[in-house]
Amino acid sequence: MTGSSYTHSPQNKVRRCCLPSKNGAPVCEKYSGDFMTAQIPETLLYNGERLAMCDQPLSVYFELIGQSPPFRAMSSANWRGYFGTWEIKEDRLYLVDLEGTLKTGEEVNLQFFFKDFPERVFAHWFSGQIRVTKGKLLKYVHAGYASKYEQDLFIDVYRGLIKNIEVKINGTAEDSSAQEGYRIAALTVFGNKRASEEQQK
Amino acid sequence: VIYAYWYLALGIATLLFILRDKVLYPSKMRSFFRDQLTKAKKNFSKQDFVDDVLIPLLTGTFVLVFWPIAVIMCVYWLITGQITLSSQINADEEKPFSVSKQHLIRKLSLEEIEGSEIINDPLGGVPNVPFGHLNKQWSQFKENNSADTELWSFNQKWKPRWGAEDIRSGYAALKNGQVLGFFVKAIEPLAGDEIAD
């Protein structure tokens, strides 16, 4: 971010919102109503697993380069307008895949934003705590990333480097046959191809 | 008939309250219409029509006809703090991030800064230049500075309109005692003991 002044983009607002903290209370409760639909999370590849990542490190990148995220919302369950896949490797956070639709309707990938880095981008711009969910659903909340799962992983990141990972056990699902993984109960599709595909999945 | 006129007049008043930013700031309204016209000339998709024409039109009609419901919703939003009586545009424009002199830390040379800000990655996920993926913004910042501009590091708390308070750090350009510009290299959350409440 450069300039003599800078204002925030509302599209960035979910970055640290609706996240239960380690003690269970929402980190910034006053925003929890802003997204009245549960949001589809980012994906984190960690220790051979594909996990649901309830944070958006890419929004910090757009803040730092002084740009509003140029994406078009795909559905009410994906206001950010893209799906990012992240990976923790050698104690570092990387962005390894990106699928998004620009406001112009053009579909873009990682190479569109990081021309010389089509396979792996070191997220050195990000510092903060990432929440990752694991296990079966305990309590569904149809807003932001507020649903509760059997485990939360709180990952502390400093300038792209993993500093600490803490596992919090939230409980055990009563229905042992329940399906594992992140769930969205309902969403409204805004009429682009990728969102329709996501809904079908 | 007179009651119908009164009903409609109150509906118009409600609509004007909801659209107060557009009414109070006609330049914003003009730029909105200019954007729409430019878009229309280029490629006005079906989705754009729904987003920019159909939904505003239906919402406006709804407010005019069913304004008592809109009033109840506005009162609820006011009570819950989701909207304020003051203009939203003003609220947005009053809070731009800027670097003030009291947050400057240390004067540094360009060489010192660029030497200490190279980001390395063993898996090759970052360019080997100062500030890595933010190098383009750094270059733009440098281009705007003249030879006699001083470069200072800064570290400043900031409460954005959306989200939690954070700490922003980077470098500021100082000339004749005035901060002329800045480059933010990092946005970091406050540590637990730094959070006021």
Image (spheres, coloured by chain):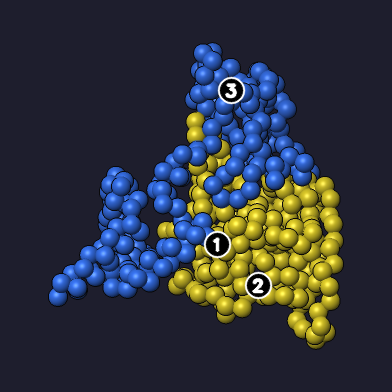
Chain colours: A yellow, B blue
Q: Mark 2 falls within which chain?
A: A
What residue is at 63 percent from the left and 26 percent from the top?
Answer: B103
Residue in the image at 19% along x and 73% along y: B3
Please, what secondary structure does the residue beneath circle 3 have? helix
Image location (x, y in percent) of residue A60: 62, 47
Give how far across and how far down residue A97 sits, in percent: 65, 59
B196 in relation to B16, above or below = above
**What residue would you read off at disc 3?**
B101
Q: Is residue A103 left or right of residue A114?
A: left
Determine if marks 2 and 3 fall on one subunit: no
Amino acid tagged 3: Lys
Mark 1 residue type? Asp
User: In the rendered image of this protein, does residue A28 appear above or below residue B153?
Assistant: below
Q: Are marks 2 and 3 in contact (CB under 8 Å)?
A: no
**Of residues B105 and A196, the one drawn nearer to the viewer in this rendering:** B105
Q: Which residue is mark 1?
A: A34
Q: Is residue B27 above or below residue A48?
A: above
Q: Position of residue B164 (x, y in %)?
A: 63, 48
